[in-house]
Amino acid sequence: MLNAEPDDTPVDDLSTLSWVHDELRRSLETATKSLRRHLKEAEALAGSDVDSVDPAVLRAARAQIHQGVGALEMIGLPGPARVLRASEAVVQRLVAKPKLLNAAAVEAVESASFGVLDYLGRKLAGKGLPTLALFPQYSRLQQLAGADRVHPADLWREDWEWRPLPADASVAPRPADEAARGTMETQVLATMRSPDRAAMARLSDLCAALGEAADGRLADLWRLAAAFYEAQAAGLLQPDVYAKRISSRLLAQLRMALAGQHEVSDRLAQDLLFFCAHAQPPDDAHPAPRLAAVRERHAVDGSASFDYSAVRLGRFDPALIAQARKRVAGARDLWAAVAGAEPHRGGGLAEQFALVGDSLKRLYPSGEILADALQRAVAQTLAAGEAPAPALAMEVATGVLYLDASLEDGEFDHPLVAGRVQRLAQRIRQVSEGRDAQPLEPWMEELYRRVSDRQTMGSVVQELRASLSEVEKQIDRYFRDPAQREVLIPVPAQLQAMRGVLSVLDLDHASQAVLRMRDDVDMLSQIEVDPKRSAHQPTFDRLADNLGALSFMIDMLSVQPQMARTLFDYDPAEGRLRAVMGRRSSRLSSFGGFDEASKPGLVDQAKSLAEAAAQDAVADDALKLGLQRLSQQALLADQRQLAETMVSAQAALERAGDDAERQAARAGLAQAMAELAAPALPPELPTEPPTEIRLTPAPSAEGDTGLEEDAEMRAIFIEEAREVLQDAGAALARLAETPDDLGELTAIRRAFHTLKGSSRMVGLKAVGEAAWACEQLYNARLAESPRLDRELQQFTARAFADLGRWVDAIEAGAPVPVDGTALAAAADRLRGRESPVADAAAVAIVPPADDAARAAAGAALRERVPDLPGA
């Protein structure tokens, strides 16, 4: 019964579950600390004149657990929520009767917390157990809470419903009379004294006969009872105390029928079905037709067959496991260095392996044996003063590798763990004594294969990222000049190769999206496209959206693979791959979830990460953890741009192979955070998605969005554009003092980004394309040499002047006098580091404080630079 199928409780997506897991851990830790503090204070005051400790601490603990119950119910996990509700009931009883609080009660609540967190952790790792694995903790809590009922079926199905069961032609109908009651009492008494299969068979026949004489739900109840007893008669179900109690409840049901009361207990029927599902399935050696009929009619699965009496979850404090992971990682790196002929790294080797040995003894069966073997091997190596022999190096590395993998899996209770730990210790001892190394055993080869698969995933992601980058480059060239159809010729083959890799990774949604992209590109490569018309604009938009979604998915695949597999969906009708986000955000607010009002808080966290990235003292692991948590929060808040930036930054840190790449990744992270922290447009003016691939429009300010004549939207655009240009001008002026100020450079890049999105939205495509070219110029400069030189300063002043003049013309209702082609071309030339593109003088723009100051500043500015807005 240990190899039951995992619990298939539906959860919206692993991102929600991951976030809830982290938040729940913090809440339950707080609750447990409160209980321990209250217990300590109560013990300290036991001999004093004070009657009792203030129960406010207990109420706070109950509130923390209650929040956890709500969060688990909201994401569709009623089983673990029921366990926490039992913890809440225990604490509530302690609030009413504080004298019942003792160490055993606190340990029971803490053990239940560990069990729930372990259950969620395994579910996240794809190795979930049935909720029945939490029954040992649940039953202990129910007893402490003084509950009337403790039953394993409480942690089984929530979707009980009556289903008619087939008639049984093997027995004659028998009415519910005194003779039937006497027969049933006699047989039940026989089964209570000792297991009696013959008595179980007679009870099965009796219940089947009662079912044939009854009608409706009462008939189905007796047929369930007949299957229940048949399972025991066939040796398919071993009765325990919970199963034995069923018999007394069935006797009570029969007595009610004799009294003319024909009400049927749903709870009794569900408990009977639970034991029919808990029994082993019948086979040729153990025929049980009544049991088979019940199991088939109710479509039972293997989740109920789990051995609910065994303690499988929550046996260890999660903090101990996290500590062990860090210790093993440190030992692995040190041993690799010493084995690689770097003896100077061996200074802390003995201490590090001593810490690993401590974790082994705490977590693993027979862990002290492997701990002793590892420490002896380390001592032998240090005494020799040279790199260990290859055989010893390999055996110790295999032992550490096994610990690393098993800690990741969290399966310390696997029946093979003790034997494997002992075998690893034996192999290390043999090699240490000078004997020949033994061939790798099958489970060791499987271990190496698993680790290799994780490393291969990193290589595959790199290949996917490089292929996608090449595809984006070719499609971007085509979009800029659709006459160059030849640039699309290699793209279908590249996409087909990507599709093969995605299929192997079981990323079916992404594979379907790439197939649609291949067909779209193939079609575009064979036809002529008129850039002045928009007949193919839907195809262009679909390609751009899919490229952006694929880029996001590939970055997430490198750092959060489980989320990457569940967070994306493909819409075959529209041919688009989309990230599924924010489905639980509104319902999670009671547990610290995210709604519209919480979005500024996420930006504040982004600012904090930007500051942390600039400090060498902050470890990469801490940054990665912060990025992962913030990306999950952003997903729940439905903030795609923030989530994508967090995932991309985390992926860049993961890819860093040396100190130079690491520093570059941190610098890029700081820049990305600064951009996100910059002011964004209001909801009325959303920006474009991250992928900026669009067909270059005809040289006209007019568009085809349907908003050209929308006066309200134009007014919003004009107001925002003036404000953005004013703030960007102030940033340009400040850069004259500090030309390498990354924040000010980023502010200007953000201004162009904002103008690009808002102008496109109101149909001013030429303005949007010009702003986009300016943004690309700043993207390149920020990536290569973030500094405002004279050429960039002159160009930026010219760009602000052109954009401002166009805004004035739009406000006046006149056609835009100049299209964006010239400005975009100038940006492209400067981006290629060619000759200067502008002659405008450097300008000093001071942000005005009010309308009068703004007018005065504008007049003074127009005198100095005639081409500025309003001239």
Image: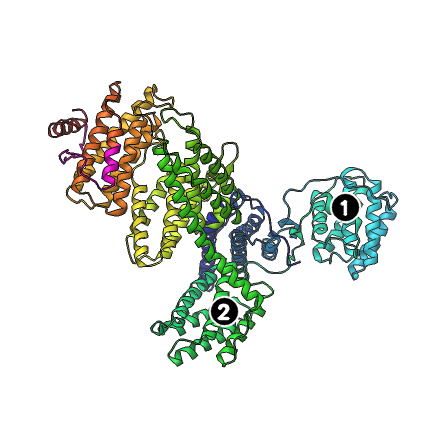
* Label placed on residue 293: 1
User: In the rendered image, is residue 527 in sight?
Assistant: yes
* Label placed on residue 167: none
Q: Quadrant of the C terminus?
A: top left
Residue sitting at 18 percent across and 44 percent down? 739
Q: Quadrant of the N terminus?
A: bottom right
Within 10 Å of disc 1 (Cα), the crowding (few <14, some 14-19, many 20+) is some
Residue 493 in the image: state x and y as whole percent. Answer: 46, 42
850 vs 780: above or below: above
Residue type indicated by callout 2: Gly
Residue 141 in the image: state x and y as whole percent. Answer: 58, 55
What's drawn in magenta, residue-wise? 824-850
Q: Estimate the spatial distance between the alpha carbons at disc 2 and disc 1, rounded to whole Å.
A: 49 Å
Residue 838 covered by magenta stretch: yes
Q: Nearer the viewer, residue 179 or 313?
A: 313
Relative to 216, 135 lies left or right: left
Within 10 Å of disc 2 (Cα), the crowding (few <14, some 14-19, many 20+) is many
Q: Name the residue carrying label 2.
A: 399
Quarter-of-image position of residue 689: top left
Relative to 669, 145 lies left or right: right
Residue 85 in the image: state x and y as whole percent. Answer: 55, 49
Residue 721 in the image: state x and y as whole percent. Answer: 26, 29
Quarter-of-image position of residue 603: top left
Residue type indicated by callout 1: Ala
Q: Nearer the viewer, residue 128 or 119?
A: 128
